[in-house]
Image: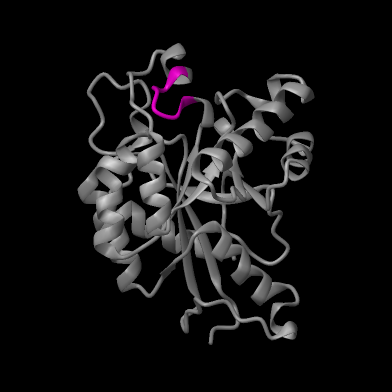
Amino acid sequence: MAKNPKLIILLYHKIGSYPKNAKFPGLYVAEKDFDRQIKYLKDFGYLFLTLSELKALYDYYFTNGKESGTIPDLISERGRYVSLTFDDGSKSVYSNGFKILKENGVKATVFMVSGLIGGVNEWDLKNGENRDKMLNTHELKEMAEYGIEIGAHTDTHPHLTLISAEEAYREILVSKKKLEDSLNTNINFFAYPYGDYNEETERLVGEAGFNGACITKTGIVKRGADFFALKRVAIRHNTDFFKFKRKIFKVKLFY
């Protein structure tokens, strides 16, 4: 068993070809590229984890997990672990990405904007982006039953540091409660919209009852990681296969 595990979280948004007039084409990853990326990681010996599973492995390797004798169900002899995360809750994650996840037998975590379930990307429309359908309750439940972990991404997708602490806490807490009530499952992880966070928002996420939260800064999860500011590696539409492999290799250098 590897003594120094590599815990990497990848950040995606939408799966599919980006429209030519898309204002933020970087949010898209083509289906064929996504499938090839997953297959590469599998061939390279990575185990795919939800964020809750990643936290269990982190506790096992870096806290008192080994001392307590508690061994997570998933252990990689090569010590390579990856969590796929999707921010926002675009319907494309279900219509284009979910089938690829199932075909490859892997899990992921989807961060949903709770107030826009079954709706459209209202925050993007205000910024001039194309209209994009959001996941509905049925799709979220189907993915959750398969093993996809659902996380919260606020209720309306605001910049949390640009609103009052009271408003921010409501956005964070309501997103958790709405998703738990509609999906009948625990919502344990959070992602900050736009990667916008500070010490105050970290505290609010903890007070709302989450086990951790993701940001958009690049890095891996290593000993001493702040679980309310988990770093990720962003994968975009222009991340070709060479760039993808380079990102995976390069990020390990920061371990």
Residue in the image at 27% along x and 63% along y: 104
- The vertical placement of 204 against 211, above or below, is above
- For the C terminus, the image quarter is bottom right
Magenta region includes residue 119: yes
What predominant SS class does the magenta segment belong to?
loop
Percent coordinates x, y for residue 68 in the rendering: 74, 83
Residue in the image at 36% along x and 40% along y: 138
Picture quarter containing residue 160? top right
- The vertical placement of 174 against 86, above or below, is above
Foreground of the two, 128 or 131: 131
Residue in the image at 28% along x and 59% along y: 102
Q: Is residue 11 left or right of residue 2?
A: left
Percent coordinates x, y for residue 195 in the rendering: 59, 35
- Is residue 192 visible in this depiction of the protein? no
What span is colored magenta in the figure? 116-122
Picture quarter containing residue 25? top left
- The vertical placement of 113 against 128, above or below, is below
Percent coordinates x, y for residue 164 in the rendering: 76, 20
Q: Is residue 207 left or right of residue 9?
A: right
Foreground of the two, 252 or 95: 95
Percent coordinates x, y for residue 215 in the rendering: 60, 43
Residue in the image at 59% along x and 23% along y: 158
Magenta region includes residue 42: no
Foreground of the two, 190 or 188: 188
Q: Is residue 167 left or right of residue 18?
A: right
- The vertical placement of 62 against 83, above or below, is below
